[in-house]
Image: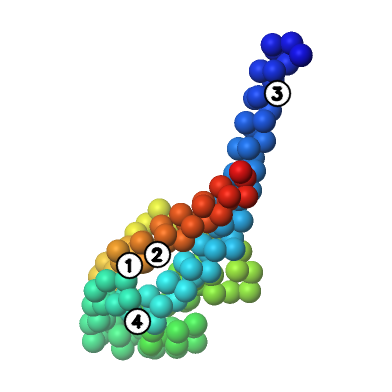
Amino acid sequence: MSRLKKIEDKITEKLNEMLKATEYFEQYVVKRFQPMFQVVQQKRWQTENASEGSQWEPLNQWYALWKKEAYFDQFGHGEKMMIATGKLYKALTLDDDSRDWSRIINKTTVVYNFDIEYAKSAGEIRPILEFSKRTIERFKSDFKEHLRKVWRLKT
């Protein structure tokens, strides 16, 4: 076999390995990370962020009354913290009919820009993409375990 052919074969082999690694990563995101992220975000809203840090500041009395009236016919009926129309909640928790993770990965079909870390509500800024050390460690640990499994499959 010529030297050039050996180099070409090595390049092809490496490219195929890279493509396979990409497939494994996509599988991880869809099968493992998406459900974990979804549960963490749902719990954040249920606990008004207490699950991921300090609890969101309560709404001021005037805004709370106005919100109940203005959004009574929406997803949270104007009573849920950080939910007016439900679009932000549904986008971050994937709590809708499609549950399409590509919305977050591609950042194209969601109304909200996922480069934000905070949401503003009634003049207060509240974290929505900050995670507790415990959650971050769980994400990291799960991803490391996934990589170990992929490495075992590959070798």
| CA neighbours of label 3 inside 10 A, class few (<14), some (14 to 19), many (20+) | few
x, y (%) of residue 31? 59, 63
Q: Quadrant of the N terminus?
A: top right
Name the mark nearer the viewer: 4 or 3.
3
Q: Residue at x 45, y 84 (%)?
A: 76
| CA neighbours of label 4 inside 10 A, class few (<14), some (14 to 19), many (20+) | some
Gap between marks 4 and 2 measured at Cα: 19 Å
Gap between marks 1 and 3 measured at Cα: 45 Å
Residue identifier under label 3: 9
- The amino acid pointed to by label 3 is Asp
- The amino acid pointed to by label 2 is Arg
Disc ID at residue 38? none
Q: Residue at x 26, y 81 (%)?
A: 59
Q: Earlier in the sequence, mark 4 or mark 2?
A: 4
Residue identifier under label 4: 47
**Residue 14 in view (yes/no):** yes
Name the mark nearer the viewer: 2 or 3.
3
Q: Earlier in the sequence, mark 4 or mark 3?
A: 3
Residue identifier under label 2: 138
Name the mark nearer the viewer: 1 or 4.
1
Q: Secondary structure at mark 4?
A: loop
- The amino acid pointed to by label 4 is Thr
